[in-house]
Image (spheres, grey):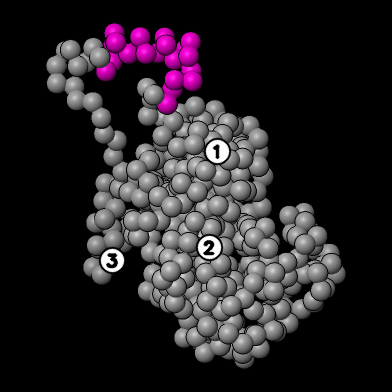
Amino acid sequence: MTTPPPIDAALQPIYDAHDGGKLSIGSKRPIRDAADLSLVYTPGVAEVSRRLAEYPSEAPKYLSSPRTVAVITDGTAVLGLGDIGPVASLPVMEGKSCLFTEFSGLASFPIALDTTDVDEFVETVVRMAPSFGAINLEDISAPRCFEIEDRLRERLDIPVMHDDQHGTAIVVTAAMRNARRLTGREDGSLKVVISGAGAAGIACAKMLYAHGVADILMLDSRGIIGDERDDLTPVKSELLGWTNRSGIVGGIAEALRDADVFVGLSGGTIAEEVVATMAPEAIIFGLSNPTPEIHPEVAARYASVVATGRSDFPNQINNVLAFPGVFLGALDAGATTITEEMKLAAADALSDVIVDELRPDLIIPSPFDPRVVPAVSDAVRQAWLNR
């Protein structure tokens, strides 16, 4: 085993914040004496177990598990680090659980599975599902993440959501709605280019299309996704039914010409002369971290609205704006799944939080805005109840 090197002094505060882990499990009931013990555990606990065996619908009243979200990964697509494995993924999963608790009040627990086999992953989650009220899938590589989510949604009667897909899509759609308002555009008139056809890119394309954006062009590492390509995966082939309807061929230079919107979820750098060919008053979301596809200073020369995935620039597209409220609303409603209508409602509610405050450097609220989680959760709850 390799001996770890000393930690750089400048990085020590980061490691200190993770020392001993970031989570703990605490008891809500004090155990001060034998009487407390007999209530919390045996013999009293048997009475509750007998009742739940006969009336399982009362589980939310007597258990913490229905208000607990499992954050589950296999460590194959962690942040910008890639396939780093289950153990190295756990600091990220613990952080996600912290965000659940801090922003929504829901309990959360991180789980890293030591398998990359889809069947094993699905079966493992199905077997542990009774211990949780919802499943948040996290940092699972594409295209496996699509199949895993679809199969778990089919087999479980609790909310399941792959946040890398749908959390990103909700926040991008909300921000795009406000950017459109600022620039006087309509969804149906937008020409949108999405660079990156992984989990997040495809989910963003689907949600924007559902919101009324009809002209969407997608690119992967080999260029524009079009009918002439013979190297497309089944997931990418499905995009051809509703994207690139003009049959544009080529790469990013051909895609961005006269485009109203760029959404970057791919990495790499786009030359300034290519950005200059976009439509006037463009909208640019360069969301790759730590280096946006189009640096905000360059983007600002050609765009009226600029967003990134970074916290040191305005308009950060951050999934924490979505998932706490989505899961809280779903659990409050007693939802058995998370529907497309719930996700669209979340996007609309998120954008409306600051509808009276819009300006080019404020198209999306801060995660610390106390209005965000109540607005999103209420919209999700109502969407389920009104289905």
Q: Give the image location of residue 84, x and y in percent.
A: 49, 54
Q: Give the image location of residue 300, x and y in percent.
A: 50, 85
Packing grade of label 3 (10 A; few <14, some 14-19, many >=20) is: few
Look at mark 1 in the image and give the residue it sits on.
385
Q: Amino acid at mark 3?
A: Leu
Which quadrant holds residue 59? top left
Asked whether residue 350 is in view, the answer is yes
Look at mark 2 in the image and give the residue it sits on.
174
Asked whether residue 216 is in view, the answer is no
- Element marked by disc 3: helix
Q: Which residues are magenta?
A: 40-60
Q: Main secondary structure of the magenta part?
A: helix
Determine the residue positioned at 41% across, 36% down: 68
Cα–Cα span, label 1 and label 2 = 22 Å
Q: Nearer the viewer, mark 3 or mark 1?
A: 1
The disc label shown at residue 208, or none: none
Packing grade of label 2 (10 A; few <14, some 14-19, many >=20) is: many
Look at mark 3 in the image and give the residue it sits on.
11
- Element marked by disc 2: helix
